[in-house]
Every structure is written in structure tokens, then in C-alpha cells.
Image (cartoon, grey):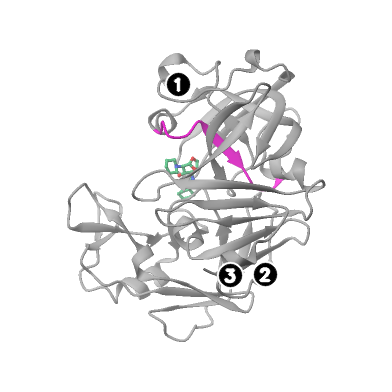
Amino acid sequence: QTGSANTNPSDSADDEYITNVSIGTPAQVLPLDFDTGSSDLWVFSSETPKSSASGHVTYSPSKSSTAKKLSGASWSITYGDHSSSSGDVYTDKVTVGGFSVSSQAVESATKVSTQFVQDTVISGLLGLGFDVGNTVKPRAQKTWFSNAANSLAQPLFTADLKHQQTGSYNFGFIDTTLAKGPIGYTPADGSEGYWGFTATGYSVGGAKLNRNSITGIADTGTTLLLLDDDVVNAYYNNVESAQYDDSQQGVVFDCSEDLPSFSFGVGGTTITIPGSLINLTPVSDGSSTCFGGLQSSADIGINIFGDVALKAALVVFDLGNERLGWAQK
Ligand SMILES: O=C(NC1CCCCC1)N[C@H]1[C@H](O)[C@@H](N2CCCCC2)[C@@H]2OC[C@H]1O2
């Protein structure tokens, strides 16, 4: 068995990617942010304060004949951008891309932080990280993918995120036609709940890859490519107008710049992010100053290959073999 779901950028800056998920009986369809950087499936619900839920599609367990309250269970999560949510837990049927898990922990939000209240295009997150990262207490719950894995044709999923176009999350199979180059595989470290890996080197503007390895995570839930300052500086030293903008909390440059590409080595292959994908968006509507898709990870302490990097590749999240595959797109 397999599943295949379309995913769409939420706005003109590809800030996040939205995938529709069916929950309960009859199906309640919610737009969720699939996040390989976390391991909770949580939703805005009938239990979310009305003022917070305004503008969001919500899940009502009381309207689902297959919903069951998970007695005594609660959850609470804080993300790297300091957004947060918490609540109680139901189990219900959850279908993604035509594949159903009959009893999935659906974490109902009784509290959500301002960032989520304001982000009305999503009704929650579907974590695709490792189960160890799940926040439900007293007993951690499995992710949708973890519950599905044993029934899928292969215990893996792929992410094919695109700039301002419809992409896909495929479960149980690899559609190699989505890629232009071979898939390079490298071991994945799931011990922290993330999909951790090591890139073997990098280069700017098509130069030969150096041998400076970069250890980080493949995170569909983070918009940017966040790397060490020495890498960020090596890149922006090639961009005449680049400067750090305190108010924007990042490197900005003239939107008219012809940005160099950024390449990294992984699993014996090279992934090249075209400069165009690193020109993320004007700092404000109509501005001729643009915000960089590559920024510093210095304040975080971990390198993050977020959507800016993932958009250049077909990425295979292979749970069965504990490995990540990257193919140029
Ligand atoms: O916190 C992270 N990543 C961190 C970024 C800083 C450095 C450490 C990792 N990801 C979150 C992301 O920012 C959220 N956001 C909502 C608004 C549109 C953009 C996405 C969304 O909710 C949780 C998750 O996804």
C-alpha cells in the first residue's frame, strides 16, 4: 500500500507548505503543516478558545463516530521559533494521501501561541520526526508515519517541495521521475527526534566542493536554510549589496542581485540550490530589498536544511534503513 498527498506553499515566500489531512468519520479535512522536525500531530479543535480559533478550520471529536478520548493524556510543545501549543488527546482515523491509520493520536489544542493564532492558513502540524520526540504524557504516542510504516509497501516517505508550485509527500514508494539526478543516501540519526545527517562539503557558485562537513537536520517545518556563520559569510561575500539588517534579523540584499548557487555534498552526490531559491522575498511588499533564504544558525546551535534546501531536491526519509536520500531536482 502507498499514499500520495499534494502540498502547496502557503504564501509568495514559500513560508510553509500546506497538506490536507482527513480526520474522523465522517471526514473532517484540515490543512496541516507537515514537519519532519517534530513528532506531534496536533490540531485546532472545538476545544481551542474561540478567540484563538477564529479563521481556522477546526476538528470536532464530538462529531466523529470513530473518535475516542485518550483518558489522562496531555501534550505540550515549544518549537525552535518559540511558538507553542498544548492540550489533550483523542484517537481517531487519520487519512493522508489516501492511506488511513485507523487509530492515530490526534492532539487537540486547548492553548495555542500567537504565531499559530495568526497563521490562519494551517490548522495544526503533522509531525514526521522520530517517535522519541513526541510530547504526549504519561505515554508518548506514535506519529502518523510510524503507525503507517509497517503497512506501507516500503517504510519510507519522500518530500518534493517546490517554489510557488504544487509538490508532494509520497508514502511507501519513491517516484524517481520527480528527480533529475541519482539519489545519494547517507545515515540518518533519529536519536533527538529529528532527521539528522552530515553533508560532506559545500561550495558557492558552482566551484568544486570543499571538504568542510556540515551536520544538521532535514526539516520541512523550517522555512530557511540555517548554517554556520563561516558558511553564510563565504556565500554572501559574493553578493555585493549583502548586509546584516538588525530589524529584519538577517542578511538582506538588493532584489536585483544575481545570486550565486549554493551546493552541498551528500551520499556521494551533489545538491545545488540555484541562487534564485536563495532570494526568498522582499522585506516588505514592493520593497527592492530582499531577505536571504540562507541565514545563520549561530543562535540555534544546530544547522537546519529547511525548505530553501529541500526545494532543490527530492528527499527520501527512509525509516526502514535509518537513512536519508537526496536527489537533485
Ligand atoms: O520553529 C521551527 N523551526 C525553528 C526555526 C528557527 C530555528 C530552529 C528551528 N519551525 C516551526 C515554524 O517556524 C513554524 N512557522 C509557522 C509560521 C510560518 C512558518 C513556519 C511552524 O510551526 C512549528 C514549526 O513550523
Is residue 125 located in the magenta-colored stretch of the structure? yes
For badge 3, the amino acid type reads Ala
Residue that label 2 marks: 186
Query: Dots 3 and 2: beta carbons under 8 Å?
Result: no
Q: Position of residue 124 (x, y in %)?
A: 53, 33
Q: CA distance from mark 3 to mark 1?
A: 39 Å
The tag earlier along the polypeptide, 1 or 2, is: 1
Q: Which mark is residue 53?
A: 1
Q: Quadrant of residue 27?
A: top right
Label disc, if present, on residue 248 of the rendered structure: none
Taking the spot 71% from the left edge, 43% from the top edge, the residue there is 131
Q: Is residue 72 above or below residue 145?
A: above
Decide: few, some or many residues near mark 1? Use Cα within 10 Å; few <14, some 14-19, many ≥20: many
Q: Nearer the viewer, residue 151 or 135?
A: 151
- Horizontal and vertical percent for residue 214? 54, 70
Query: The disc labelled 1 sits on which kind of residue?
Result: Ala
Q: Spatial distance from mark 3 to mark 2, Cα to Cα?
A: 12 Å
Residue at left 62%, top 35%?
A: 41
Which of discs 1 and 2 lies nearer the camera? The answer is 1
**SS category of the residue bearing label 1:** helix
Closer to the chain start, of discs 3 and 1, is 1
Q: Amino acid under label 2?
A: Thr
Q: Residues within 10 Å of mark 3 (few under 14, many from 20)?
A: many
| Residue range (magenta) | 119-130
Q: Magenta span has 251?
A: no
Mark 3 vs mark 1: in front: 3
Indicate the secondary structure of the residue bearing disc 2.
strand
- Crowdedness near tag 2: few (<14), some (14–19) or many (≥20) residues, C-alpha within 10 Å: some
